[in-house]
Image (spheres, rainbow, N blue to C red):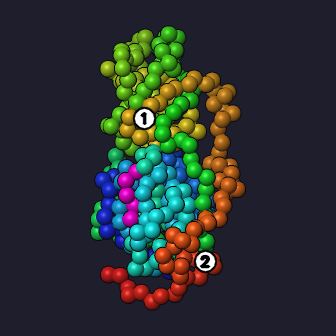
Amino acid sequence: MTVRLFVDAAGPLMSVQDLGRPGRIDVGLSRGGAMDRTALLGAAALLGGGVRAGIEMAGMGGTFRVDAPLRFALTGAVMRASVDGQALRWNASHMLLPGQVLVIGAVRAGSYGYLVPAGAVLGRDVLGSAAAHLSAGLGGRLQAGDVVQIGAVGAGAGQVLPDRDDLGGGTLRLMPGPQTQMFSAAERARFAQTVFHRSPQANRTALPLMKDGAGFAALGGNPVSDFIAPGDVQITGDGTPVVMMAECQTVGGYPRIGTVIAADLARAAQAPVGAALRFEWVDVGRADALFVPEAQQLTALKAAVRPLVRDPRNMHDLLSYQLISGVTAGRDMEPLP
């Protein structure tokens, strides 16, 4: 059975995202995909099965309806969410029934929240991915009036994961790269001692960092253009550090002082505007030791899932909940347009 998810209202930067399109640098296309890959892994743990596409919401969510029961997970940046006025737990899975309205409001912690359905997003695959790559013009933003087609979703009771602690900035571990030695030892030390703040100009392409005082400079000017990837930290001509994000270009000419390790990219992406960020140098051996394959991350997240326990006093309509897996009130609903 196909479920239609109706987008009645949409925030300013809402799009369908999955894990992107790796391996296409030869055609000038960066990986793209979710800004916070950890959020999609968490949704997979909550819903069971593999990683699937979801709706990425930057700063603000939207309003949604369905024409058939839809199990979904809310992960990533914490946003205000409710179904028919009843608040929903974030980092948890829930059920939306025909006739109900899911409202996702402003972000409360982090920057990018995710609404991930239990079924596959249909009809949006381009080059093997459903992800909208906005800077490359593949797909586009979701807007009010759009309908997202979802494949068979199955039944299941609510699940929850522990709250995350990486949504407010903090320390990003930085490993050296091929151009690190273009910066003096003193400049690299000053870089690690500086407190930066996320710029309001950050987007899916890059994360500029603000600071007080002088900028940073390489010893020998700009290098020849070279391949770049998410996590690389370029130093622009005015000395501003810029962390490359999911939709970064594939080639750049600014010198890269280092690369944020994969384990800390979600922290970088989720830092809210103005959040403090610092860098800590780690060598390549330490960076390798800290790397955890996403399949292994998913296994750990699945082990951390627990049943979602609701307080009956806050459940205004008990029959609308899956008190027994797969069983609800069974109300007949008029089909949506």
- Which region of the structure is painted magenta? 103-107
Give me the disc on residue 314.
none
In 3D space, how far apart are the residues under numbered discs 1 and 2 (Cα atoms)? 40 Å
Q: Quadrant of the C terminus?
A: bottom left
Type of residue at label 2?
A: Leu
Type of residue at label 1?
A: Ala
Say whether residue 106 is magenta.
Answer: yes
| Coordinates of residue 158 in the picture (x, y in percent) | 59, 68
- Callout 1: few (<14), some (14-19), or many (20+) C-alpha neighbours within 10 Å? some
Q: Which residue is mark 1?
A: 275
| Coordinates of residue 69 in the picture (x, y in percent) | 49, 77
- Callout 2: few (<14), some (14-19), or many (20+) C-alpha neighbours within 10 Å? few
Give whichever of 98, 173 is nearer the camera.
98
For residue 168, say whether it is visible: yes
Residue at 43%, 11% (x, y): give it: 219
| Coordinates of residue 310 in the picture (x, y in percent) | 58, 67
In the image, 22: left or right of 300? left
Give me the disc on residue 323.
2
Residue at 48%, 39% (x, y): give it: 168
Up-down relation of residue 267 to residue 254 (above or below): below
Q: Earlier in the sequence, mark 1 or mark 2?
A: 1
Give whichever of 74, 217 is nearer the camera.
74
For residue 226, say whether it is visible: no
